Amino acid sequence: MSETQEQLVTRQFGPRAADYLASAVHASGEDLQQLAALVAGARTARLLDLGCGAGHVAFAVAPAVAEVVAYDLSADMLAVVAESAKTRGLRNLVTQQGGVERLPFADASFDVVMSRFSAHHWRSFSAGLAEARRVLKPGGRAAFVDCVAPDQAVSDSFLQATELLRDTSHVRDYSVDEWQRALTEAGFRPGAMTRRRLRLDFATWVARMRTPPHFVEAIRALQQEMAADVTGHFAIEADGSFTIDTMTLEATPA
């Protein structure tokens, strides 16, 4: 099978759009509340939800702003977002399809750019951030939420391996240093950062992505073979459930 990264992401996530809409991990959380709080009172703002997935950021911020553009590579995801927005009465939410590496928007066309649990799927992390900076107005604000790679190399390798086995469209979970460096190179000034820990129920985690049984077995085998410092960092439980690091990182144009 020969696919581009964009085709792979679309194939992986399109059929799972409804699962992601219903996912408790994606539909709630302190990070989502934090993003909504960042735009409280921004009544005239136009906001871009970059790599919106099932639309949870867009739904959370839409009541506070003038317009939200929910942008994603998957047409199936966007269909779910549009239908759910209609059900919720969010008339200021529109959807648009495309990749993050070349956004179909004019320079300085958004007051706020947000992205949550999307960047680890981007074909080009640097290009996606550069485009986010290009479409952000001077004086605008950005906020990025994602999984964070550990500083310890072996724990980093374990995380990337399990992510890839679970979802073959995975590219990389970046470290805090990698995020801050990439944002700076893209023309942002990294700001406040909030770090959190997120527990993932193993059965739900693999079921949501419909991970093939042989990959599920490989993940469990890895978990059982790793050294104590790795299993301790991820708090791996008897049933395979584990805990990862996440981050909310705010940024402004440099």
Image (tube, grey):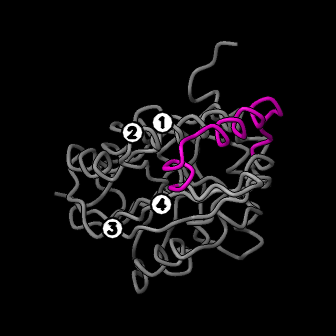
Q: Are marks 4 and 3 in contact (CB under 8 Å)?
A: no
Q: What residue is at 73 percent from the left and 75 percent from the top?
A: 88
Report the label total: 4
Q: What residue is at 33 percent from the left and 38 percent from the top?
A: 126
Q: Main secondary structure of the magenta part?
A: helix
Furthest residue in direction right, as rendered: 213
Q: What residue is at 80 percent from the left and 29 percent from the top?
A: 214
Question: Type of residue at label 2?
Answer: Ala
Q: Crowdedness of circle 2 by 10 Å Cα count: few (<14), some, many (20+)? A: few
Circle nearer the N terminus (4, 1): 1
Q: Are marks 2 and 1 in contact (CB under 8 Å)?
A: yes
Relative height, residue 173 to residue 169 (above, below)? below
Q: Quadrant of residue 131?
A: top left
User: Circle 4 is placed at which residue position?
Assistant: 246
Furthest residue in direction front, as rendered: 228
Residue 153, numbered circle? 2
Mark 2 and mark 1: Cα distance apart in space: 6 Å
Mark 2 and mark 4: Cα distance apart in space: 17 Å
Relative height, residue 55 to residue 211 (above, below)? below
Image quarter hosting the C terminus: bottom left
Residue 223 magenta-highlighted: yes
Question: Type of residue at label 1?
Answer: Ser
Comparing marks 3 and 1, which lies closer to the viewer?
1
Relative height, residue 213 to residue 4 (above, below)? below
Q: Secondary structure at mark 1?
A: helix
User: Circle 1 is placed at which residue position?
Assistant: 157
User: Circle 3 is placed at which residue position?
Assistant: 193
Write down the region rendered in magenta.
209-233
Mark 4 and mark 1: Cα distance apart in space: 16 Å
